[in-house]
Image (tube, grey):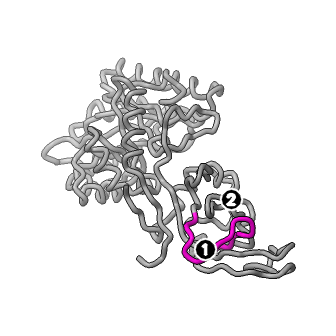
Amino acid sequence: MSRPTQAVVDLGAIARNYRLLRGRAGATAVFPVLKADAYGHGASAVARRLEDEGADRFAVAIAEEGVALRRTGVRAPILILGFSDPADLPLWKSYGLTPSIYDVPQTRAIEAAAAGSSEPLGVHLKLDTGMGRLGVLPSDLPEVIELLRRSRWLKLQGTFTQLARAQEPECSTTEGQIETMRRCLAAMSGAGLDPGLVHVANSAGLLVHPSSLFHAVRPGLALYGVLPSESIDPDGLEPAMSVETAVMSARRVATGTPLGYGGTFVTARPSTIAVLPVGYHDGFRRSFSGRVSVLLRGKEAPVVGAISMDLALVDATECGAKAGDRVVLLGSDAGRRVTAWDLARAGQTIPYEVLCGFGARVPRVYV
């Protein structure tokens, strides 16, 4: 690859984060969440490194993500947390994937698809305890309990829910969801249905809500060293991804020079402007325009003008620039740092979207 734009992923940092989170979980099992290509870090490389660390199960969002992991040699059990369509039954069986059931019609359809199989299909049951998004509602749970209790073709291996506001340590919503989950589990056990492996805690749950630890936890963002809230103590977690490029051209321009599409920025002084080979198609979002700085020669250089599809401009007047100079978009240099939260605030989004946004055109380099 000739273009210098790349994402450098520190697999050692992910391994250390995993060990730290596993220690926080105690005897509780850990599902490292590898959906969205491991939050942009590269699911296959991350999974193989974590298997070396002793990870014995993983979670993804859709079947295709599980298939991709299997095709690169990942052996551990893989749970599909989201979209699970009965038509994917051959994929689940061929690649050893465990689907989730999340409403009554879908559960009945999966049972019908599995009918006649040589052995029951293992599934996890997702409950909606207050997220309001996906999962069997408590009011529908009796019907699902009866269906699973009588089914010859489905075997319940686990039960889980998704916390809606766990990143807000003082919010009472999380404890309310946990209490609803306990009532649902009691109803299942009381009806003679074993809930199996129960998992509730996401990253924030694991870090700040001890009551959300049941049989297993599902760390996602924290595994990659980024916190779900800036109010949570990082407690030794290390950001694993940095994104960097290099100056492709630098030039002096006069006062009053408009820069970029629309001329939205006009220089107020003679300036050194550096052109970077990165743009919004790479994940350096247009909404960052005029609102973030990069690190160039160990100093902050503000982005000026509108970020375009393939290029961005920075004001290098204070630090100087020449073609080939290293530029850090996310990460650290000479004691300064640009974090995923810095970029998220600038883009009026969340760090999850920032990390996932660095797309396939940005090659991953693993260290």
Residue 328 in the image, given as x and y percentages of width and height: 57, 61
* 265 up-or-down from 94: above or below: below
Residue, x 64% and y 61% (percent of image)?
294
Residue 81 in the image, given as x and y percentages of width and height: 40, 45
Residue, x 64% and y 76% (percent of image)?
275
Quarter holding the C terminus is: bottom left
Q: Quadrant of residue 177?
A: top right
* 218 up-or-down from 96: above or below: above
Q: Quadrant of residue 145?
A: top left
Q: Earlier in the sequence, mark 2 or mark 1?
A: 1
For the magenta stretch, what is the residue range? 309-327
- Residue 276 bears which disc, if any? 1
Residue 38 in the image, given as x and y percentages of width and height: 42, 52
* 147 up-or-down from 109: above or below: above
Q: Would residue 271 be found to the left or right of residue 108 on screen?
A: right
Residue 231 in the image, given as x and y percentages of width and height: 64, 34
Q: Is residue 143 visible?
A: no
Q: Which residue is mark 2?
A: 300
Q: Is residue 305 visible?
A: yes
Residue, x 82% and y 76% (percent of image)?
270
* 138 up-or-down from 38: above or below: above
